[in-house]
Amino acid sequence: MTPFHLAFPVRDLDETRAFYGDVLGCAIGRSSATWVDFDLFGHQMSAHLRPQASQAASDGKVDGIVVPIPHFGAVLLMDEWERLAARLEARDDVDWLERPMVRFKGEPGEQATLFIRDPSGNALEFKGFRSLEQIFAH
């Protein structure tokens, strides 16, 4: 798998370092006074300081459940997803949008999912699959 890169706006770099480093457990990479890189499950995420940036509220529906648009995250194998879900559930400082659940149960593409917000309001989704071949199953 080739990692992807995503640059996204944040309001404060210190709270962003604490969230991605402490809450999600991401390794912190290079940084400057206006940006910081994180290793999000092997992908390069670059948080760029934009104090005035705000997220427009918009929702979509997946499997009958409202989901925030836009959002980003990672696709994980189920054991890694379960560890992340347990890590997040054990904390009292997580801004939950959708607690851990299973979508498309018993269907092709069955997946576990959860949604959280970072301190800047960015929505993140983490998906868990028993097999990566199920990602695009239909």
Image: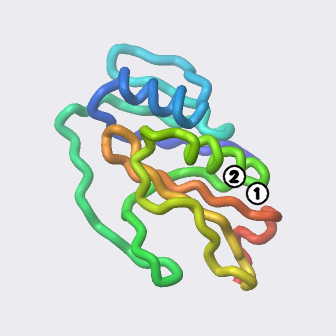
Residue 50, quarter of the rendered image: top left
- Kind of residue indicated by mark 1: Met
Horizontal side, residue 30 vs residue 119: left or right:
right
Horizontal side, residue 13 vs residue 55: left or right:
right
Residue 113, quarter of the rendered image: bottom right
Q: Are marks 1 and 2 in contact (CB under 8 Å)?
A: yes
* Residue 119 versus residue 31 in the image, above or below: below
Q: As rendered, which of 127 and 95 lies closer to the eye? A: 95
Q: Could you say whether the residue bearing mark 1 is in a helix, strand or loop?
A: helix
Horizontal side, residue 28 vs residue 134: left or right:
left
Q: Give how far apart the Cα atoms at labels 1 and 2 are.
A: 5 Å
Tag count? 2
- Give the image location of residue 13, x and y in percent: 35, 24
Give the number of the disc on residue 81. 2
Q: As rendered, which of 97 and 74 lies closer to the eye? A: 97
Q: Quadrant of the C terminus?
A: bottom right
Measuring 47% from the left and 83% from the top, which residue is drawn there?
64
